[in-house]
Image (cartoon, rainbow, N blue to C red):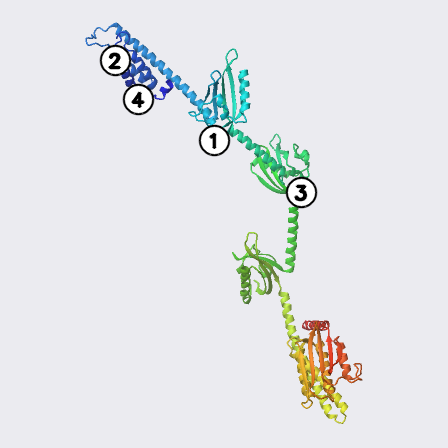
Amino acid sequence: MCSYLLRWRVRSAAGGIGVAVATTLAAALLRAGAGALAPGTFPFAPFILAILLTALLAGYGAALLALMLGLVTGWFFLIEPAFDFSSIPAQHIASSILFIMVGVAVIVVGQALVTGIERETAREQRLARAQAFGKVGDWEWDLATGEITWSENLYRLMGRDPAAFQPSPANFAVFVHCGDVGRIESVLREAIANASRFETEMRGVWPDGTIRHFVSRGEVIGDRAGKALRLVAVEIDITERREAETALANSEERYRTLFNAMSEAYVVHDIVYDEAGNAIDFRAIEANPAFETHTGLPRDIVVGHLASEFAPGGDPHWLHFFAEVVRSGQPNRLERYSPRPQLWVDLRAFPLGGPRLGIIFNDVTPRKKAEAEREAAEARLAAAMQVAEVGAFEYDPVDASVVTSGSCNAIYGFTEVLPSRPLSDYLARIDAEDATTFQAECERASRERTGFGLEHRIRTIDGRAKWIALRGAAVTNPRGEMRIVGAIFDITARKQTELQREAAREQTEILFREMNHRTKNNLTIVASMLRLQSSASRDDPNIRRHLDAARERILTIAELHTSLYQGRILGEIDFADYIRSLCVHIESSLLSSERGIRLTVETEPVSLSADIAIPVGLVVNELVTNAIKHAFEGVNGQAVITVAMARRNGDLVLSVADNGRGLPACWSSRRNGLGSRIVQAFVRQVGGQLDVVEESGTRFEIVIPAQTMSDAAERSGTQNDCAAE
């Protein structure tokens, strides 16, 4: 009740006065209602209670005021209408003095009671706060009555509402995990039986199913005979600790799994210092299986041993590096060659507190060897590109910059070596006639993402003219950015040679055509002389016949030279056109309308070198001339001579056919007539084959192999090249 009254305790002066007046008034009313009592007995008794209440609710000052008000009010009840103040009864004075003494005593006792209650309340509040902060709750079990009392904080820890839940032995299993009920009951029975202390762990269950972990500590209090009277205990909520322990265990399990499964070597070292604080060695604390794989050192000779023991004579740089990581408290990374064992390592070290550090490293020896080989290959390539005067480039269309290597700077005459240059620097060096084509090709390659190649002229910074060959292609780098990459070649020497060769070829062609023209003219003069000689030999028909035949052969050769100097391709003759011209000439010189012989030509477009065309032309001349002279003697009807030329399986097939009387019975290809010998000789000269077919006249067929024509064309081209050089 006192602690309840303390809740209404006032702290202000006005409040204290109000309390004093109110309690005195209540006491006066009580005194008035007890008028039946004898005034002399103790008229101030009700006011003692008012003083006590005022002392409890308002403190010393208000209680003294209540004492004075009670004294005055009490005297009011002692005074009678005829009271004589000059002679106050001793009894009243004694009652007043006693009231004052008792009132002061009540004030002192009341204040002492308030102080004690406040101290007890403060202690309980501190205990409650301590329990709340420490997540501790206490409880007590009266073994005689079976009543169980929980502290306020235990209700909170158990997730229970004090107004709705009353703990008892019967509902013990409601808030204890089913897996712990049997064990906890056994612990409590043993403690009660032995009147001893106990400590155990249990899991509590909240109404929503949440599980909390507790440590239970308590003791059984008994009487002198050892009989258990009550059980007091505390419950400490260790849920966070248990979760932290579980998380730590899981973390340790994950760490160990990673520790054993990781492909990188992992080792933990402690730095060893001398008395002066200088790092002198380091000791391996633990190492994972990959450490053995990378170093070849068994873990049992490494873990727990100093580096000077398992790797004597090692590189002192490692100790300095490790000690600096521990000193600075900052992680660091190093790539270095380790002579013991002989390998390149990529090492990352990080502090673990105190003299300890962790180290993760990879054996990068294969990568370092590959890098060294790549660098050597790049150096060889750069040297080769320098010697061959070849440059490589990479063009970025976004910022129009060009990154070059090799001989690019030397080719363009740039003396200052820069990481990159704007494209405009190179465009300024390109000949004005070629710049438009160059830029169009670059734009096309960027747009279509295809390759390109072109040759153009440049003028270096010092004014020299050069020819450049450029080959490139649009590519996409790993970041998805488009670039144009390629190579640049200095082809000035080649271009100069080509230009010189072209000029020589043109000069050779002019000389060749002039030579054939003059040869044709000379042969025409010889033919004219033979014609004059034939005209002068009227008395001897045989001489005249032979002179005419010779003249026709010379004119045939002259016509071939005409085709040579008039042809589009140097050293080659449009043989189909030549055959038609030859037949027209023969027809105009040997045939007359009275004879009624028709000469036809059927030929495909064929180009032949002079080596093949001249002998084949003479063969056609001989065969057509002979057919005109001898094939139609005594034959009636339309006389036809057909000259045909076509390709068959790559070979050239030439035929001269007539529908005349055929060959005489005594004819033989081995006869020694001049015409026959000329035909046989020229066919052999071109590597051909001559066949004679007699069917509705006579057909001479000459087959010239494709290989013969190919070899002749190759010889002709080689001769032209040599002449140009």
Eye-nearest disc, 1 or 4:
1
Numbered label attached to residue 32: 2
Near-viewer residue (42 or 699) = 699
Give the spatial CA distance, label 2 vs label 3: 111 Å
Judge whether 57 appears above or below 83 on screen. Answer: below
Eye-nearest disc, 4 or 2:
2
Q: Element under label 3?
A: strand
Give the labeled residue for mark 1.
208
What crowding class fits label 3: few (fewer than 14 Cα within 10 Å), some (14-19), or many (20 or more)? some
Q: Amino acid at mark 2?
A: Ala
Mark closest to the chain's N terminus, 1 or 3: 1
Picture quarter with the N terminus: top left
Kindly tell me whether residue 245 is visible in this rendering.
yes
Numbered label attached to residue 15: 4
Q: Estimate the x, y position of residue 526 in percent, counting from the top left.
A: 71, 86
Picture quarter with the C terminus: bottom right
Q: Amino acid at mark 4?
A: Gly
Q: Element under label 2?
A: helix
Mark closest to the chain's N terminus, 1 or 2: 2
Residues tagged 1 and 2 counted as in contact (Cβ below 8 A) = no
Give the spatial CA distance, label 4 vs label 2: 26 Å
